[in-house]
Image (spheres, helix red, strand yellow):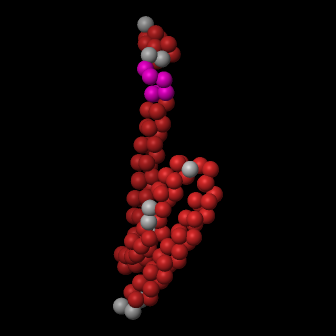
Amino acid sequence: MAASILSPVESKSCAPGLGRIAKNGGYLLFSGQIARLLTFLQAVMLIRYLGPEKYGALTLALAVPAMFAFMTEMGLNSVMVRVIAREKDREAQIFEEILPVKLLCSLLFVFVVLSSASRSSQY
């Protein structure tokens, strides 16, 4: 009786691919939790190794560029994907038009980060 409950014929009653989606979702959830745990352990070990002052300086050095990183993106990636999805035949032309804008934004980002770093070193 127990073998008939677990038979492959019985499992086909649910929607096709649903079990695969659930399994992949479980893997994704599990891997996300493992990544969070490893990130936490890495932070704890780094704090113990560097000490509070050096870890604070490292955190500040990573946070300042992260605050300005949005300037390099400015939604251009999502716009590019949307336009290319509509006009697949102009993919290369669209990419060539957006690339200089992204490079200009990146240069502006580097300038802002370097100028803020030079000002913060005065204090």
Tell me if residue 15 is in the magenta stretch: yes
**Residue at 36% in and 91% down:** 123
Vertical relation: 19 (above or below) 39: above
Query: Closer to the camera, 6 or 72?
Result: 72
Query: Closer to the camera, 84 or 60?
Result: 84
**Residue at 59% in and 49% down:** 88
Vertical relation: 72 (above or below) 29: below
Residue 6 visible within the image: no
**Residue at 52% in and 48% down:** 86
Tell me if residue 29 is in the magenta stretch: no
Query: Closer to the camera, 108 or 27?
Result: 108
Dominant SS in magenta: loop
Give residue 38's position: percent from left, percent from top: 45, 55
Quick one: quadrant of the N terminus?
Answer: top left
Query: Closer to the camera, 122 or 99?
Result: 99
Vertical relation: 64 (above or below) 79: below
Vertical relation: 16 (above or below) 47: above
**Residue at 62% in and 50% down:** 89
Give residue 32's position: percent from left, percent from top: 43, 48
Choose top left, top right, bottom left or bottom right for residue 41: bottom left
Residue 123 visible within the image: yes
Magenta part of the protein: which range?
Answer: 14-19
Left or right of 108, for residue 57: left
Give residue 78's position: percent from left, percent from top: 47, 56
Q: Residue furthest bottom?
A: 122
Give residue 115's position: percent from left, percent from top: 44, 86
Left or right of 22, for residue 100: right
